[in-house]
Amino acid sequence: MFNYEKYLRMNRFPHIWCTGCGIGVVLKALLRAIDSLKLSKDEVVMVSGIGCSSRATGYVDFNTLHTTHGRAIAFATGVKMAKPEMTVIVVSGDGDATAIGGNHYIHAARRNIDMTVILFNNHIYGMTGGQYSPTTPQGRFASTAPYGNLEAPFNTSGLAEAAGASFVARTTAYQVAQMERFMKQGIQKKGFSLIEVRTPCPVAYGRRNRLGSPVDMFKALKEGSLTKAQAEKMKPEELEGKIITGVLVDVEKPEYIDEYDKLIERVGKAVSG
């Protein structure tokens, strides 16, 4: 049996997450991925902002930063600039990363900064009052959308792809083996990596939208998911409401910190010469 406790600050338990929440499932997959890569706790920095998933940094025994709302990627950028040898992992929610943190998300992907962002996408601001987020589907209810959300949701994986990320993958909290595999790939990839995980929020989102029990919500993730290969054979109308899983982007391209160091070296030679 996997020993999770060696990666956890057990004195910080019990955790705050609701019964049936998928965040613990995602965190456990991340810990297994880190362990399988043989990374020491001292060479990992985990950064988070504000939200349910962002509380994870308080429970793990790595170098951690629990930062301000939407600024996790900005703080992670600073860590990577100062300590490029560190493995930098950002854990963030859909609201934290793509609403108040949206510009940081876009520009870190554009610059291709070497970090791995684990985006917990549960379609809601779960911790701060159940407000709708940039990923809440149209028609779904939230505390700030009592008559249904009017806005079209972000395709968060597509946004990272369009901005220039080196690695983008989407999975769900139900598909734990796939999730762990994608996390390992993302961490190993040089450049900006995004792993979007669709995960249930049975309380703030599920109850308000009458989605049933946590088990029902996990079943819905299973039944609503398609592989990228399956999706390519289907018509657009058949893909409505489906979750397309798989590695969506895996490319080699220059990484920002490496290019920045080359610039410093080049300028230094020019000045001294």
Image (spheres, rainbow, N blue to C red):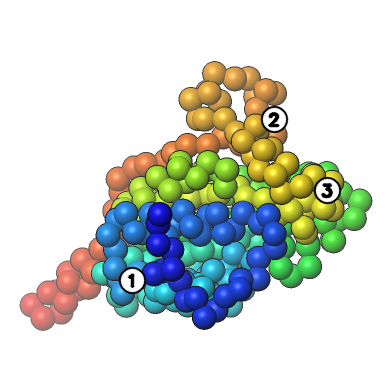
Q: Residue at x 91, y 51 (%)?
A: 147
* In the image, residue 222 above or below residue 125: above
**Residue where numbered disc 2 is placed:** 240
Q: Reading the chain from its start, which is encountered first: label 3 or label 2?
A: 3
Mark-to-mark CA distance, 1 and 3: 40 Å
4 and 54: which one is in front?
4
Which mark, residue 209? 3
Mark-to-mark CA distance, 3 and 2: 18 Å
Label 3 element class: loop
**Residue 156: where, in percent of width, then height?**
58, 49
Q: Amino acid at mark 3?
A: Asn
**Residue 271: where, in percent of width, then height?**
15, 79
Q: Amino acid at mark 1?
A: Lys
Image quadrant in which the N terminus is located = bottom left
Mark-to-mark CA distance, 1 and 2: 42 Å
Label 2 neighbour load within 10 Å: few <14, some 14-19, many 20+: few
Query: Which of pointers 1 and 2 indicates the residue nearer the eye?
Result: 1
Labels 1 and 2 touching (C-beta < 8 A): no
Is residue 72 shown left or right of residue 141? left
**Residue 171: where, in percent of width, then height?**
53, 43
256 and 25: which one is in front?
25
Label 1 element class: helix
**Residue where numbered disc 1 is placed:** 41
Query: Which of pointers 1 and 3 indicates the residue nearer the eye?
Result: 1
Label 1 neighbour load within 10 Å: few <14, some 14-19, many 20+: some
Q: Residue at x 33, y 71 (%)?
A: 41
